Image: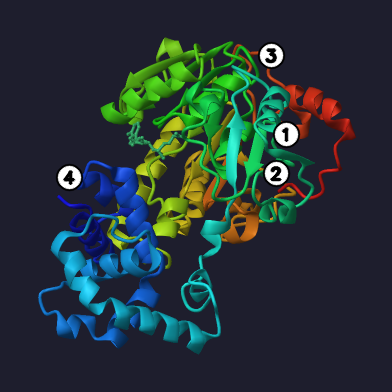
């Protein structure tokens, strides 16, 4: 299928909510997915401008066979994109006939709105939302390298290192080739929002994991010490598993489960590239994993990051700003699974700490699931205050809900996220104990970070947690 026809088909699919932009791009038969994705994204970004120009130029009235989505893609390419550059076939010939009128209407629109650049037209009506301002977070994989060496590498590549962030404003103000060290996670680098490191040699070699800051918090808050046994209940594609392995320094064991064979296959690649050697992967329903199985006798830590509506995901917010919430039925089904998985996880006999996380903004999948699991555990577990200085807290739907944390582009410059930390109220005396530290959830008190913090003593003071 030709590029423009493919882009028009994807655009139509996105607008009629047949799927996400990325999903529809991959489902199309067009080979160069990157090119197709970029064209549809940009056309969508300028959608309101293109509608205004096409309408006032009377394009669809004059060309009855031209479908609206194709018109939008073609006019984008003609006026705002790279031009047809030898592509376009009969559609290029058709647009050539209207070129002068379309250009005149675009110029008129700019005069009308008092702007001189095409980009400035976006400020009226379709300005990029907060999701597009979220910086590019990059976790340094400490199984392969360290922050200091990585910073040096980027400096040698012409990037300008600005030191350790001291406020959220520092992160939001990043531009060009500048980068920072995050104020909360000493292995997290922060680059300007549009930075693409997918082709970077350090990423290809598994030294870097491209992971949003909010998604780094679950493993950080679980904080299993080296040597301990951990379950990652819904693990693929494995970003958090690789983070757990880094915290364990590859010592101890991670039992990682997932139902999806395809996602597990890419997870296996990711873990190999990241140098993870302490993880056992299993294609298995976590609900069918028996807590009384001898193999899990020493599991004191569980990470539960189950399937969710993904309503907080940045890609979703970028592709479908303002998209409606997931349907009630879907939410009910997801919440029922999440609650079952959480209550099941809390029955592992040696469990001391569990982190429950979702990239959903919906109370039904977050606070409601947590409350139901607490009630079902009959006092055996309580919520620990997760990062007390983090500014965005759980919705106050029950007394301890403020112990949970939430994240969003607007409040924390991250993707939308929810985290609850459960800890056992009483330690059963028969449980064999690993060299577990007191379950203090502040990162500065985890042993590894303490060392790093001392090293970073000359860095500016951290201020608020984000
Ligand atoms: C949000 S994703 C996990 C992301 C992962 N923790 C990471 O950070 O890369 C949820 C995963 O749960 C898996 N899943 C869904 N139901 C499951 C079940 N009953 N048992 C195990 N895994 C399940 C899905 O296949 C999906 O890969």
Q: CA distance from mark 3 to mark 4?
A: 53 Å
Q: Is 227 left or right of 66, judged from the image as shown?
A: right
Q: Residues within 10 Å of mark 3 (few under 14, many from 20)?
A: few
Q: Residues within 10 Å of mark 4 (few under 14, many from 20)?
A: few
Picture quarter containing residue 438?
top right
Q: Is 349 left or right of 446, judged from the image as shown?
A: left
Sequence-earlier tag: 2 or 4: 4
Question: What residue is pinned by disc 1?
Answer: 443
Across and down, in percent, residue 296 comes to 46, 15
Picture quarter containing residue 252?
top right
Labels 2, 4: front one:
4
Secondary structure of the residue carrying numbered label 4: loop
Residue most extreme to the left: 65
Secondary structure of the residue carrying numbered label 1: helix
Labels 1, 3: front one:
1
Sequence-earlier tag: 3 or 4: 4
Q: Which mark is residue 264?
A: none
Q: CA distance from mark 1 to mark 3?
A: 17 Å
Sequence-earlier tag: 2 or 3: 2
Residue nearest the viewer, comparing 167 with 392: 167
Question: What residue is pinned by disc 2?
Answer: 387
Question: What residue is pinned by disc 4?
Answer: 29
Residue at position x 51%, y 47% from top?
370
Question: What residue is pinned by disc 3?
Answer: 435
Sequence-earlier tag: 1 or 4: 4
Sequence-earlier tag: 1 or 3: 3
Picture quarter containing residue 272?
top left
Secondary structure of the residue carrying numbered label 2: loop
- Residue 103 position (above or below residue 145): below
């Amino acid at each position: 299928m030709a590029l423009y026809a493919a882009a028009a088909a994807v655009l139509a699919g996105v607008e009629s909510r047949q799927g996400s932009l990325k999903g529809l791009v991959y489902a199309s038969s067009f080979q160069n997915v990157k090119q197709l994705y970029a064209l549809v994204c940009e056309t969508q970004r300028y959608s309101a401008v293109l509608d205004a120009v096409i309408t006032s130029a009377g394009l669809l009235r004059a060309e009855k066979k031209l479908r609206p989505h194709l018109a939008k893609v073609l006019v984008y390419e003609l006026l705002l994109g790279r031009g047809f550059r030898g592509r376009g076939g009969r559609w290029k010939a058709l647009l050539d006939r209207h070129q002068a009128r379309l250009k005149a209407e675009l110029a008129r629109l700019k005069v009308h709105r008092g702007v001189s650049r095409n980009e400035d037209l976006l400020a009226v009506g379709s300005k990029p939302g907060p999701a597009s301002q979220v910086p590019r977070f990059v976790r340094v994989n400490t199984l392969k390298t360290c922050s200091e060496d990585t910073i040096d590498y980027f400096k040698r590549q012409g990037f300008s290192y600005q030191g350790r962030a001291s406020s959220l404003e520092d992160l939001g103000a990043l531009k060009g080739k500048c980068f920072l060290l995050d104020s909360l996670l000493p292995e997290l680098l922060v680059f300007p929002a549009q930075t693409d490191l997918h082709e970077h040699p350090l990423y290809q070699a598994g030294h870097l994991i491209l992971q949003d800051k909010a998604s780094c918090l679950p493993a950080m808050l679980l904080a299993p010490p080296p040597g301990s046994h951990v379950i990652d209940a819904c693990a693929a594609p494995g970003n958090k598993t690789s983070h757990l392995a880094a915290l364990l320094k590859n010592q101890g064991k991670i039992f990682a489960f997932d139902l999806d064979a395809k996602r597990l296959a890419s997870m296996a690649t990711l873990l190999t590239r990241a140098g993870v050697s302490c993880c056992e992967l299993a294609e298995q329903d976590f609900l069918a994993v028996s807590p009384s199985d001898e193999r899990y006798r020493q599991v004191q830590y569980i990470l539960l990051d189950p399937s969710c509506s993904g309503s907080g995901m940045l890609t979703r917010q970028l592709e479908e700003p303002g998209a409606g919430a997931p349907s009630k039925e879907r939410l009910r089904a997801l919440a029922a699974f999440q609650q079952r998985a959480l209550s099941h996880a809390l029955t592992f006999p040696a469990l001391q700490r569990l982190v429950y996380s979702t990239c959903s903004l919906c109370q039904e999948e977050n606070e409601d699931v947590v409350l139901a699991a607490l009630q079902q555990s009959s006092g055996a577990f309580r919520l620990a205050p997760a990062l007390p200085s983090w500014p965005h807290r759980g919705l106050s739907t029950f007394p301890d809900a403020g112990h949970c944390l939430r994240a969003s582009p607007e409040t924390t410059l991250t993707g939308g996220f929810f985290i609850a930390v459960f800890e056992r109220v009483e330690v059963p005396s028969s449980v064999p104990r690993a060299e577990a530290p007191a379950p203090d959830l502040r990162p500065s008190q985890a042993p590894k970070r303490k060392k790093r913090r001392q090293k970073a003593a000359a860095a500016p003071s951290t201020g608020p947690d984000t």
